Amino acid sequence: MVYENPDGVRIGLEVHVQLNKLNTKLFCGCSTKYHDSEPNTHVCPVCLGLPGSLPVINEKAVEYAIKIGLALNCSIVEQTQFHRKNYYYPDLPKGFQTTQYDFPIAGEGKIIIEGEDGEHVVGITRAHMEEDPGRLQHMGSIDKSKGTLINYNRSGMTLIEIVSEPDMRSPKEARRYLDKLRSILDYLDVFDGDLEGAMRVDANVSVHWGDRVEVKNISSFKGAERALLYEIMRQKNHIRRGGEITMETRHFDEARGVTISMRTKEEEHDYRYFPEPDLVPLRVADRVPKVRETLPELPDAKRERFMEQYGLGETHARALTTEIKVANFFEEVAEKVDPKDAAVWVSDILKGELNYRELSIDAFTVEDIVAVVELVTGNKVTEQSGVEIIRTVLDDGGKPQDIVEKKGLLKVEDDIVATAVEEAIAENPEAVADYLGGKEKSLNFIVGKVMQKTKGRADAREAREKVLAKLKE
Amino acid sequence: MATWTDISGIRQKIADSSAEEITASYIETIGKSKINGFTTLSEEAINVAREIDANGHGGPLAGVPIAIKENISTKGLSTTCSSKILQGYVPPYDAHVIEKLKAAGAVILGKTNMDEFAMGTSTESSYYGPTFNPWDMDRVPGGSSGGSAAVVAAGEVPVSLGSDTGGSVRCPAAYCGVVGLKPTYGCISRYGLISYANSLEQIGPLATNVADIATIMDVVAGYDNRDSTSINRENTYSDALKDDVKGMKIGVPEEYFGEGIDEKVEKAVWDSIAKFEDMGATYEKVSMPHTKYALASYYIIAMSEASSNLARFDGTRYGYRVDGDNWHVMASKTRAEGFGDEVKRRILLGTYALSAGYHDKYYLKALKVRTLVKQDFDKALANVDVLMGPTMPAPAFKIGEKIDDPLSLYLADVNTVPINLAGVPSISVPCGLADGMPVGLQIIGKHFDENTIIKAAYSFEQNTDHHTRRPPEVA
Ligand SMILES: [Zn+2]
């Protein structure tokens, strides 16, 4: 099946990733751990842009950038350089942003996503390094604001801007691309995606192969999908009404779910890029082999291995390798129990329960899930009870064994079930006769009686088999 | 009464009396000054001197007073680039050179006047008003480090620091009859120097003699990991203080004696070269064909960089602010009122040169010319040890004479800007008088070969008496 792309949709994404796992900022020694701090406490002359201060490149940031480039299958440039992007804004303490222009650290690459019609390649145009500006905070609502406060804690944080080709053909593909990107970055351990502002998205959208419109200010992946759906609809409607789409920049209003025009092409800024004289060109080619050695197994490779090594199906393998933490968790569990059981319990059951509670895999221990799987596969508790144990651990805490005991979840002994079956058959001759006479439903009645007698601790499927066996005697 | 005392003389005086007394006597002299060379005096200076007296200090500059140009950041001491827009700004940190000076025991007396943001050749564009040349109060001291040169010439301080983007140390040194060095780019950390044109400028010392220049260089030069353009290279500058130019090959660029050169300046320079011959050196004329394009290239690069460097002065975080209904209005009004005409002119021209559609025609072309100018130096210096010529084509001009004619002001930099484009070191030493005003001889060296030009300058000083001439009021 080939995806037709009836509206000629083309989406390209520019994703800003904040490398918040670096210890220090891009051009100064300030700590990056500002997220829980008072405003303007993680600043120095450099990131405040005080007169006379000079930038010095964070070598670790360069290493991370190369790592990201390699993971996105990008070429790494021989020599990289920083440029100044000149514009005025109060969150920009120097009146320019130090970024990269014609010598970005990483050139063309690609990412493979699950597209509308199977595997789909999204080209990466480039990935470059730049500094984050500070943050503005309005006093009161934006229209009645008495003033604006500026917090420069974020100023000078390392950003990697990853620019894709317009290769995505639907908002769904865009979402898949973002998920995949996040997954890869997660694997590289270069950023904590849960921190505020860790990933910011700008999108280029066009329909019917027309001019592209840039949509800015998208702050979440869900927001990206909504913004794109809206923007595609808007462009289609506009064309349908005889309008023409011209290049412009629009702003996504997250609360209203709409995009609003910010400026047309004629109003575009002239950023007057020129090489940053305070930073010398940086040779990076010789660093690549060493960084390549530090590259971990990435999601695609891990998925293949999981299928091969553990005999998993693609769905399980994919679900288990999206997040590195889940993949590692699974592998630990798979060491102790049958990998296929581990896949079912981790991927289908545990992850479902965690997602429902908006919890990460950190909320559960390997030890506990192994205990649950062993209880179920060892026939000590029913599958239903296994799920209940997981829910109890998540909601009330405690260890699986204690929960089994406290809740009396241990499966009843076979002879008790056998006795219950015998009694149920003896006590309900009419139902037995009905069943033997061809009334299938009567079987359920008898099984129900067995369950009643065992107070539900018998495994329903087992009880049914035992009743059937007895009736055939 | 102001006097000229060199660093070793000062150290002797301190040994005989105290650092406090020396500091106090300089402060007294400054108090009577008529040249407007200082902008701000340090209230801490006397305490620093007392501290040195009380606890002793083993540093090479223990108790030696020094003056610092207004664009070098001094913690707790106003640093305004002589601009209205930085009124009220007090840096919370010291520049690298200030840390070095303090560690060496120097006593910072205060800050010196300059052209606003170092954009000028006369120190007339300062928010604090012009500095006057101690040789003739009707004349400019040169610029942009006019204050730093004038206070040394006037005996108000033995040594000072300036900065040289296109001649800003050498020009006032020449005009005020003192010695000034523009070191190789990367020699002294720029950390804390408020940028005008980053790719061109260096901090440089001014003094009454070459030995003091070497002493200051030994303290302030060297690698600093906070300046990415700083070069890690060890050197002892005072090792070069030898009277020995035998066999030294001098190149004399014809282009440095071009149209508009003052006859008396020309004569003083040729006499000096003849003196070098007497001392055992040889000279040959060399050609530096791209010199005539250097000025245009320099101004485009400097203004382009400046347009971006000065963007941060918007009244938001520090300095002068004019309130407005919103941020953009506030920033615009602040800049409109805070910057002087010359600064605005350069920001506008620089912005234009970097704009889409003009970037290649101006900025990129200027960079190409810069490469050609560099090649001129590489070629010329391949066959000779040093280059010599006049620092300035004419002696100091009258205050107000060129203020309304920026182009003729720019032309005065014709012999100094090529050196900044090439990044090589150059020293200006007094080499005579023209109509009673000092003339500077410029000695240019190879990259990081400060020692050869210091040796040449020192030898010249040992064999001539130009450096002993003082302005009328100074003994
Ligand atoms: Zn900082």
Image: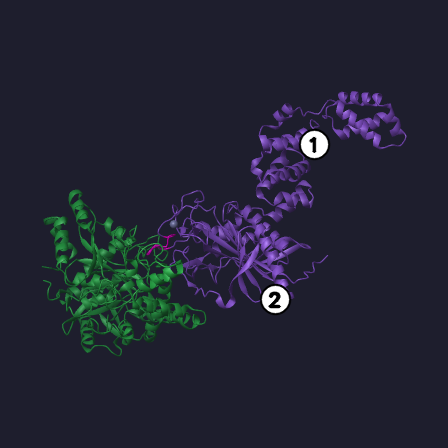
Q: Nearer the viewer, residue A383 or B376?
A: A383
Quadrant location of residue A99? bottom left
Nearer the observer, A157 or B341 = B341
Question: Residue B427 occupies which quadrant of the picture?
Answer: bottom left
Are both tags, 2 and 1, on one chain?
A: yes
Furthest-right residue in view?
A: A437
Judge whether B473 appears above or below B9 on screen: below
Q: Chain A rendered in what hue?
A: purple
Instruction: Look at the numbered disc 1 and give the secondary structure of its residue.
Output: helix
Image height of A417 relative to B213, above or below: above
Residue stretch in magenta: A46-54
Which of the chains is green?
Answer: B
Q: Are marks 2 and 1 in contact (CB under 8 Å)?
A: no
Q: Which residue is mark 1?
A: A383
Q: Residue at x 18, y 52 (%)?
A: B64
Residue A48 shown in magenta:
yes
x and y percentages locating residue B341 in the rendered image: 30, 68
How far from the left and from the top, in percent, is residue A15? 53, 54
Residue placed under numbered mark 2 in the picture: A210
Residue depicted at 39% across the width and 58% down the height: B327
| Residue in the foreground of this view, choosing between B63 and B47 | B47
Q: Main secondary structure of the magenta part?
A: loop
